[in-house]
Image (spheres, grey):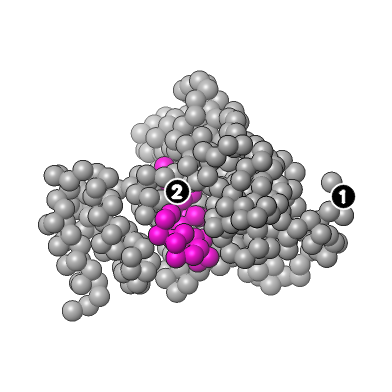
C-alpha cells in the first residue's frame, strides 16, 4: 500500500471515530492534531507523522469531503505561516509541545513584533532593547505595523541584546506573552478606515529566558526563517483558476459588456495571464518546499503578489466607472482578518496599497531577488561591520 493510501485510510478511521457532525469543533481540531493530521510533515507528537509535506493535500481532501471543520487559517495566519515553522526549527522540545497545539487549533492567536518606527525596511537596525536580569530579560521599545496584536496571546519578538556588536549580530529572538504587564497595544487606523494594524509599546516587559528561541545573539538568523516563511505564506498561497483578486474583475467583465473597451480588454488579458503564471509559480514553489526550507524564491512570489493586486484592483475600479469610486464603510473597526474577495472594489483598491509594504517592502525584496536568486553583486553596505551603538540615527 502506498503512503498516500495509508494516510487516506488513517484519515477515514479518524473521521469514523470523530464524526464532524457529532463532535465539538474544538474537540475535533485537538483530536486531529493529536492524530498527526494537522501538519503531516511535522514530527509525531507535534501534529504530524513525519510524512512528506505533499501528502497533506490528500488528508485535507478527505476531511473537506466529510464536512470537517477547519482551524480558520486566515485568522491565525501569522501563527501557522510564521511562528510554527520557526518554533519547529529553533524551539526546545518543551516550547514545541507548549505552543504548537493551541497555535494550530486557533485557541491562541499570534502576532509578529519585528518592525519599528526607525527599523522597517532596514529591520536589522531595530532598537528595542532586551537586558538580561537573572533568568529573565527586561524588554523596552516600540513595534509598529503589528497585525492581530489586538487579538494575540503570543508574539514572536526580536530585540537588541548587545549594542556593541554590528546590527545583524546583537539581536535575540523571543516569544512574548501579550498579556504581560508593560505590553500596550494601540490601534493604527489605515486608509481603509479600519485599524487592522497596531503599534505595540513594551515597557519593562519581563520575558523568561525559557521563552528565548535560538541562542543569544542569533536572532537575525532565526528571524530569516520567519521572514522566508512569511513571504511564502503571503505570495505562495494555493488558489484555483481565477482565485484571488483576478476573480472579481473577471466576473465584472463578463457581467457588464457595456463597460468594455479595447484598452480595458487588453489590460485584463495581460493581468489574467500574469495571475495564472503567478498561480503556477506558487505551485512550483510549494513543491520545492517538500524538499526543505523555503528559499529566496518566496521573495519573488511576494513581489508578484503585491504588484498584481495593485494593478488588478486599479483595473477593477476603472471598469466599474463611477461605482468603482464608492467605498462601503469608513467606520473605525478592528477586524480579525483581511478579506480581499469578500468586500467591494473600493476596499480592494485601497487595501492593496499595503501589499508592497507588508511582509517586506518591494524595494528590499528586489534586492534579495537580485543578490540571492540572480547572483548579482551586492549593494555596498558601509554599516556592515560598525557597532549598532555607533550608527547614525
**Which of pointers 2 and 1 lies earlier in the amino acid sequence?**
2
| Cβ atoms under marks 2 and 1 closer than 8 Å | no
What residue is disc 2 on?
77
Query: What range of the chain is rendered magenta?
Result: 74-99
Where is residue 172, by image quadrant? bottom right
Residue at 73%, 60% (x, y): give it. 170
Task: In the rendered view, tell whether residue 356 sits above or below residue 279.
Answer: above
**Quarter occupied by the N terminus:** bottom left
- Give the camera-side residue of 231 and 85: 85
x and y percentages locating residue 293 in the rendered image: 50, 69
What residue is disc 1 on?
392
x and y percentages locating residue 57 in the rendered image: 30, 62
Within the magenta stretch, is there residue 83? yes
x and y percentages locating residue 315 in the rendered image: 53, 38
Q: Is residue 259 visible?
A: no
Label 1 environment density (alpha carbons within 10 Å; few <14, some 14–19, many ≥20)? few
Task: In the rendered view, tell whether residue 331 sits above or below residue 191.
Answer: above
Residue at 48%, 49% (x, y): give it. 78
**With 69 as the anchor, is 379 left or right in this view?**
right
Residue at 35%, 72% (x, y): give it. 50
Amino acid at each position: 500500500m502506498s503512503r498516500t493510501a495509508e494516510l487516506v485510510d488513517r484519515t477515514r478511521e479518524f473521521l469514523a471515530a470523530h464524526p464532524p457532525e457529532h463532535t465539538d469543533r474544538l474537540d475535533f481540531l485537538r483530536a486531529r492534531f493529536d492524530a498527526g493530521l494537522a501538519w503531516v510533515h511535522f514530527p509525531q507528537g507535534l501534529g504530524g507523522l513525519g510524512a512528506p509535506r505533499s501528502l497533506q493535500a490528500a488528508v485535507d481532501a478527505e476531511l473537506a469531503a466529510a464536512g470537517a471543520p477547519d482551524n480558520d487559517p486566515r485568522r491565525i495566519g501569522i501563527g501557522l505561516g510564521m511562528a510554527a515553522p520557526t518554533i519547529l526549527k529553533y524551539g526546545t522540545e518543551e516550547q514545541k509541545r507548549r505552543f504548537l497545539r493551541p497555535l494550530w487549533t486557533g485557541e491562541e492567536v499570534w502576532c509578529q513584533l519585528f518592525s519599528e518606527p526607525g527599523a522597517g525596511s532596514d529591520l536589522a537596525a531595530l532598537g528595542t532593547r532586551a537586558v538580561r536580569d537573572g533568568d529573565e530579560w527586561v524588554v523596552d521599545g516600540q513595534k509598529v505595523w503589528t497585525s492581530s496584536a489586538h487579538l494575540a496571546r503570543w508574539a514572536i519578538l526580536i530585540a537588541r541584546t548587545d549594542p556593541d556588536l554590528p546590527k545583524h549580530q546583537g539581536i535575540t529572538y523571543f516569544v512574548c506573552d501579550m498579556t504581560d504587564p508593560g505590553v500596550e497595544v494601540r490601534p493604527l487606523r489605515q486608509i481603509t478606515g479600519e485599524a487592522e494594524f497596531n503599534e505595540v509599546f513594551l515597557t519593562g516587559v519581563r520575558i523568561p529566558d525559557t521563552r528565548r528561541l535560538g541562542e543569544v545573539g542569533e536572532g537575525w538568523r532565526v528571524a530569516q526563517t520567519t521572514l522566508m516563511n512569511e513571504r511564502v505564506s503571503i505570495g505562495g498561497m494555493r488558489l484555483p483558476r481565477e482565485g484571488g483578486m483576478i476573480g472579481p474583475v473577471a466576473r465584472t467583465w463578463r457581467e457588464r459588456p457595456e463597460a468594455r473597451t479595447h484598452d480595458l480588454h487588453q489590460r485584463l488579458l495581460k493581468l489574467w495571464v500574469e495571475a495564472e503564471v503567478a498561480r503556477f509559480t506558487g505551485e512550483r514553489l510549494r513543491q520545492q518546499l517538500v524538499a526543505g526550507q523555503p528559499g529566496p524564491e518566496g521573495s519573488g512570489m511576494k513581489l508578484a503578489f503585491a504588484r498584481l493586486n495593485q494593478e488588478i484592483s486599479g483595473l477593477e475600479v476603472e471598469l466599474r466607472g463611477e461605482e468603482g469610486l464608492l467605498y462601503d464603510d469608513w467606520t473605525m473597526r478592528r477586524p480579525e482578518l483581511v478579506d480581499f474577495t469578500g468586500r467591494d472594489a473600493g476596499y480592494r483598491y485601497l487595501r492593496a496599497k499595503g501589499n508592497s509594504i507588508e511582509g517586506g517592502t518591494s524595494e528590499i525584496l528586489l534586492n534579495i531577488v537580485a543578490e540571492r536568486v540572480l547572483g548579482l553583486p551586492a549593494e555596498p553596505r558601509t554599516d556592515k561591520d560598525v557597532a549598532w551603538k555607533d550608527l547614525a540615527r
